[in-house]
Image (cartoon, rainbow, N blue to C red):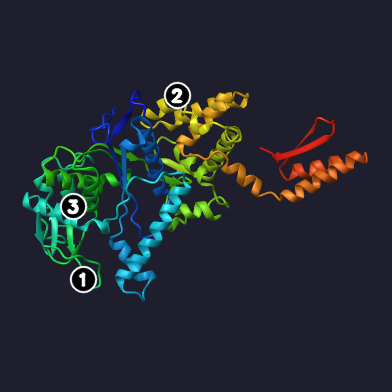
């Protein structure tokens, strides 16, 4: 625990960066909107997972791991899930088909983000496990006259909240302009949104005071965050695309249901992601899942290690847009390999604290660019043989969620070690036979394969040859 660190975070709600002061330093609470598990998570979904994992790690460092609660939800009830279940499992009853879809995609998501170096959140609630909490919240909104029933739905009345739109900066009158009133004639206001909607016989549903139905998207996160973090908590985070309507509507529901001044005191949002300068889209054939990046050659003709993807995501400040490209991945891979080559020799990483200058950089609104520069400085010191710097580099990389030798192991496992050793033995025999041309030829052949030989003498004065991959 390091309470002497001052965190400054940018708050979307106030539009300024300010000192972070938790409600209770013994129970710092963070909520991040997780995936809707109707399909494998795409590379855009990886960015909030990685960015706010770094925030989680930093909060644990500052306040102590036992004093931080991180909740990241799983949305497993959604009309997209229903459609995918019908498409992929036409022979199964819908509830069973939905379970097949959500279990498969949730497992894949957990596997993917773990490969990206993310810690497991404290709690990962599922929407389907919190239906009662959603119904209680809807009941409170109806009782306080912030919601109403119409045409088989329960809707939130945005007109009942004087400062609705504060997070996004949207004026309610702007939402009215051009609205298709005729389509939503049962609404008091075109901006009113669904809290509960009826389910047909072939749709998933739960019994409720308003008939058999299912929740709207926004009420899910309000209910889950309240259950596990309380009516008002410290930080709510997610992608920039969630500011409106999702986070705006979460705030409306939670505040109006309880009469509180806030839902969360700090709102953090990561920027958008493009792929090779274009918006990610299936029509452009640049829609890439995390799993495809990790396990296939769809992007750049090869699979990419999770460590490399993690570093590539962090090389741009989290609030800025990011252009995800092969060149960016290659740059990240080179930098990471340089760090690992040095850090992998550390013997005391587990007992060494992360570098103070790196922590200071991160404490300034997760400024990983500054942190990365500091890591490069440490790496240069360590490359000159400073054992303390080696341990510091290794400890700081571990703090960030990077492994110390993943690329190095991958490099060596891709080499036919037996054939290299045979070639070295042949070269030694050539030296002994004074066939220096053959020895040079063997050395050149290995070098062409990226194998660098190093000759030395042992205590008995005999030639000893070792090898490594050329950097």
Can I make out residue 246 in this image?
yes
Q: Quadrant of residue 342?
A: top right
**Front position in the image: 358 or 230:** 230
Q: Write down the residue under mark 1.
A: 200
User: Against 45, is 181 above or below?
Assistant: below
Label 3 packing within 10 angstroms: few (<14), some (14-19), many (20+): few
Task: Name the residue: 58% across, 23% down.
Answer: 381
- Pick the quarter of the image with the C terminus: top right
Farthest bottom residue in view = 91
**Front position in the image: 381 or 464:** 464
Q: Write down the residue under mark 3.
A: 178
- Pick the quarter of the image with the N terminus: top left
Looking at marks 1 and 3 on the same chain, the residue that comes earlier in the sequence is marked by 3
Foreground disc of the pair 2, 1: 2
Q: Write down the residue under mark 2.
A: 357
Q: Residue 370 vs residue 195: left or right?
A: right
Label 3's element? loop
């Amino acid at each position: 625990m390091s309470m002497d660190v001052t965190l400054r975070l940018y708050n979307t709600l106030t539009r300024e960066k300010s000192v972070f002061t938790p409600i209770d330093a013994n129970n710092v609470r963070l909520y991040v909107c997780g995936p809707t598990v109707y399909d494998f998570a795409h590379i855009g979904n990886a960015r909030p997972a990685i960015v706010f994992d770094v925030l989680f790690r930093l909060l644990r460092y500052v306040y102590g791991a036992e004093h931080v609660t991180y909740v990241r939800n799983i949305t497993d009830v959604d009309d997209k899930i229903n459609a995918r279940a019908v498409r992929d499992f036409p022979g199964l009853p819908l509830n069973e088909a939905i379970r097949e879809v959500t279990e498969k995609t949730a497992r894949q998501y957990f596997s993917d983000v773990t490969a990206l170096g993310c810690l497991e959140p404290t709690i990962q609630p599922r929407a389907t496990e919190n239906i009662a909490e959603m119904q209680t919240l809807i009941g409170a909104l109806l009782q306080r006259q912030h919601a109403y029933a119409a045409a088989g739905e329960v809707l939130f009345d945005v007109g009942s909240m004087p400062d609705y739109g504060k997070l996004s900066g949207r004026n309610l009158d702007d939402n009215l302009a051009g609205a298709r009133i005729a389509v939503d004639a049962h609404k008091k206001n075109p901006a009113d949104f669904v809290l509960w909607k009826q389910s047909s016989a072939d749709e998933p549903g739960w019994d409720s005071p308003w008939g058999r139905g299912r929740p709207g998207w926004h009420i899910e996160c309000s209910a889950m965050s309240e259950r596990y973090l309380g009516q008002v908590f410290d930080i709510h985070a997610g992608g920039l695309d969630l500011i409106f309507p999702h986070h705006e509507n979460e705030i409306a529901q939670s505040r109006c249901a309880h009469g509180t001044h806030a839902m969360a005191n700090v709102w953090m949002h990561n920027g958008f992601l493009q792929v090779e300068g274009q918006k990610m889209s299936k029509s452009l054939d640049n829609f890439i899942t995390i799993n495809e990046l990790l396990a296939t050659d769809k992007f750049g003709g090869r699979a990419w290690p999770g460590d490399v993807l993690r570093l590539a995501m962090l090389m741009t400040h989290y609030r800025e847009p990011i252009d995800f490209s092969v060149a960016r991945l290659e740059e990240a891979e080179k930098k990471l390999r340089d760090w690992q080559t040095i850090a992998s020799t550390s013997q005391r990483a587990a007992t060494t604290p992360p570098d103070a200058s790196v922590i200071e950089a991160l404490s300034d609104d997760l400024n990983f660019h500054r942190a990365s520069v500091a890591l490069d400085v440490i790496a240069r010191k360590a490359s000159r043989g400073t054992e303390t710097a080696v341990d510091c580099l290794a400890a700081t990389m571990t703090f960030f969620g990077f492994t110390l030798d993943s690329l190095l192991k991958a490099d060596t496992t891709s080499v036919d070690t037996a054939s290299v050793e045979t070639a070295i033995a042949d070269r030694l025999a050539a030296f002994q036979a004074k066939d220096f041309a053959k020895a040079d030829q063997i050395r050149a052949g290995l070098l062409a394969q990226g194998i660098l030989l190093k000759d030395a003498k042992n205590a008995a004065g005999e030639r000893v040859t070792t090898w490594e991959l050329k950097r």
